[in-house]
Image: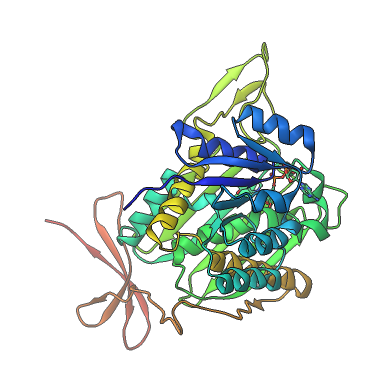
Amino acid sequence: MAIKEHKITMLGTGLIGMFYTMALHNQRGRDRVHMIYSRNEEKAKQFAKDWDIPRWTTNMSEAIYDSETDVVVIGIPNYLHKEAVLTAAKAGKAILCTKPLARNAAEAKEMLDIVEKAGVFAGYLEDLIYPPKTLKSLESVRSGAIGKVNWCRSRETHSGPHSDWFWDNEKAGGGAIIDLGCHCIEISRNFIGKNIRPVEVMCWADTLVHPIDAEDHGVGLVRYENRSVGQFEVSWGFQGGMDLRDEVSGSEGTIWLNHFMRTGFEMFTTGAKGGYVSEKSGSDVGWLFPVGDEAHEMGYINMFQDMFNAIDENREPIETFYDGYIVNAIMDACYNSVKSKKWEPVNLAVWRGETQTKEKNDVDKLIDGQYFLIKEERMPDGQIKLILKDKNSGKITQKYITEE
Ligand SMILES: NC(=O)c1ccc[n+]([C@@H]2O[C@H](COP(=O)([O-])OP(=O)(O)OC[C@H]3O[C@@H](n4cnc5c(N)ncnc54)[C@H](O)[C@@H]3O)[C@@H](O)[C@H]2O)c1
């Protein structure tokens, strides 16, 4: 592969603009932000100075059309993603857009159509597929180490976002589900298999803590065509830091991932000297859970490596605008289910995965030609106990085996 150096237009100087720039300029990185856009002149100038960025502007179009940059990274609020994509596609630039892709599936579909029509590279910046632990777990799942994934549970909770626009239903497209659920849904999709069609959704959401219209809590079940289930749990009312955990339960094994708290790094301080611990840590006194290399552990480093390698290799990245669209469609079904209190279908105007996936349970282990093995367990006395189901009558019995 011929490695190229890319010059980037970064849109946004907020939290994610800063993390993205930190990740890109990490370890003397060759792909660098060359033009920074912020609507606020002081912020733009300061950001350019802090990160050694040659150019800044308060004009989004000027930033996108910069003649020296070939990639546009979108790190501005959700309601501005579509406009940024439209302009960047017209400018013929490669586009990398943060999560959620859009506020709803209709908007996401428009964005997908825009980039495909323009024929430009488009990557969906879902960083939580890329933490080193997650990439390795996905490899294990794909190699069959934990059998068929039946259930994936993904949780992201913290005390609520850091800027006004997140709390505005219209600007964000929803509350905790659109903000955090998008991560959890795509994590489960990756573990269950992105080729497997999400079929229907049951979701509860409520506004329990904050005086807002959008939901600040949500729990959802996404059922897939192979009968696997993705479960997400999100909250903007969780105290104690940022809780980011995934559990993958397969027919032959289990994976537990803890990304942000209790990662093996725990520290106590009386508060003699406070300061930043990690994103939304909630406290800088007492027992703390700092995160070693936040940009890496959140997946930003591997994510940009995949995105820029994909551009150079003329291939799709792991996460595409199409994936972002599927996630938005699942979240639309969640909001429908919250209202109806029923299972709601995931309506997909475009589906590029398997059609009519067969149930892939490999649980039917036949013994002696007569019994299905339900369970095998070694008991405290050392004997092995089998729970069996008669193939013909369906009767359930148990049997002991004594090892010689
Ligand atoms: N892990 C992740 O992938 C992750 C984490 C945080 C945020 N995000 C996403 O990144 C995007 C930005 O979030 P953030 O946390 O950086 O928000 P933020 O509020 O910290 O920063 C937003 C940036 O956009 C600018 N902005 C706000 N309103 C604007 C307007 N009307 N016109 C032009 N610029 C405007 C702000 O000045 C700021 O530079 C959102 O889509 C969010 O969902 C992703």
Q: Is residue 254 left or right of residue 82?
A: left
Residue 319 x/y as whole percent: 50, 60
Q: Nearer the viewer, residue 190 or 381?
A: 190
| Location of residue 55 by image quarter | top right
| Location of residue 213 by image quarter | bottom right
Residue 214 appears in the figure: no
- Decide: is 389 above or below 190: below
| Location of residue 168 by image quarter | bottom right
Residue 301 appears in the figure: yes
Residue 82 x/y as whole percent: 70, 63
Residue 10 x/y as whole percent: 63, 45
Quadrant that contains the C terminus? bottom left
Number of numbered discs visible in the structure rendering: 0
- For the point 33% across and 55% down, the residue is 140
- For the point 77% across and 50% down, the residue is 166
- For the point 63% across and 42% down, the residue is 35
- Decide: is 206 above or below 292: below
Q: Is residue 220 left or right of residue 310?
A: right
